[in-house]
Image: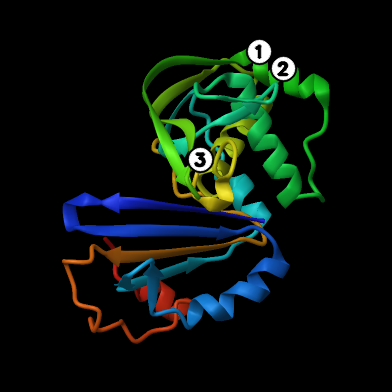
Amino acid sequence: IFYTSITSLSHISKYRWHLSILTDAGAEMLMPVLDGLHDVQIEHWSFPIVQKEAQQVSLEFLLRQSTDTTRTNIVFLTPTAFRQSGRYTIFPQERLILQSLISRWNEVFPECPLEDPDAFEALLTGLHIVDYHLKTTRFSLKGIRIPGFTGSCIVEAKLAPPLLALWNTLAEFSNDAGIGNKTSIGMGGTKVSAMSASLKKHTVSFCMVLPVFKALPETAAIPDYSPWRPDHAAAAPKD
């Protein structure tokens, strides 16, 4: 299980590739490959990697990130869509967002599942999208243009403290799990802008900054450090 998204850092003419590996088995298989990766080939173009960052923390740490905020600003960075009754739904709905997050949570944390239908309905009753700024878009995949949306929405939570903490934990989790369909190929990239960077158990978050083709030559120097070492990760350059 993994989630990936590529977003533009237009102010510095670069792209960020965010890759979250959501299982131990996936991390063991992919970390050596990512550690040795120095450029990315896309069709006829070669993009040198100029920065790598990695994080791996516990489930307990993620649970401690929960806040008591009652408004959550969810930014949909890449085209997002849901499947409902065999069709794509191109508007965020409280039920669809919550279902997506809980489904992904249960896949990643089977030792701490969220399976109580009464709790789900109680959460859903207290969540309301109170504002949004969205536009429809398409995600191209092998000649198919999948309908979706990008933009942002504000979700207001009128919940009792335990349920509020649970919702804010799920919202934080979305930063590295994504929301909606086809998150493993780049759809559903999200950012909870009002909360701190999310962390998760048994998850490796692998971020790369790729320069635009004209910005740097293919022979651009690569920083000489391993992103998997804690001392180097702490010293990794920031945007």
Q: Is residue 136 above or below residue 111?
A: above
Q: Which residue is mark 1?
A: 125
Q: CA distance from mark 2 to mark 3?
A: 25 Å
Q: Is residue 55 visible?
A: yes
Few, some or many C-alpha atoms within 10 Å of disc 2 (few <14, some 14-19, many ≥20)?
A: few
Q: Which residue is mark 3?
A: 188
Where is the C terminus found, in terms of image quarters? bottom left
Q: Is residue 13 above or below residue 189?
A: below
Are circles 1 and 3 on residues that touch, CB within 8 Å?
no
Residue 74 position in % (x across, y down): 44, 32
Q: Is residue 205 left or right of residue 212?
A: right
* N-term-proximal mark, 1 vs 3: 1
- The residue depicted at 77 percent of the width and 36 percent of the height is 114
- Taking the view exactly as shown, the residue that stands out farthest to the front is 143
Few, some or many C-alpha atoms within 10 Å of disc 3 (few <14, some 14-19, many ≥20)?
A: many
* N-term-proximal mark, 2 vs 3: 2
Q: CA distance from mark 1 to mark 3?
A: 24 Å
Provide the secondary structure element on which disc 2 rests. Answer: helix
Q: What amino acid is found at the position of numbered circle 2 in the picture?
A: Ala
Provide the secondary structure element on which disc 1 rests. Answer: helix
Residue 100 position in % (x across, y down): 65, 34
Q: Is residue 91 above or below residue 176?
A: above
Q: Which residue is mark 2?
A: 122
- The residue depicted at 22 percent of the width and 66 percent of the height is 213
Q: What amino acid is found at the position of numbered circle 3 in the picture?
A: Gly
Q: What amino acid is found at the position of numbered circle 1 in the picture?
A: Thr
Please name whichever residue, 48 or 173, is drawn nearer the observer in this view of the structure.
Answer: 48
Are circles 2 and 1 on residues that touch, CB within 8 Å?
yes
Residue 174 position in % (x across, y down): 55, 41
Q: Is residue 164 visible?
A: no
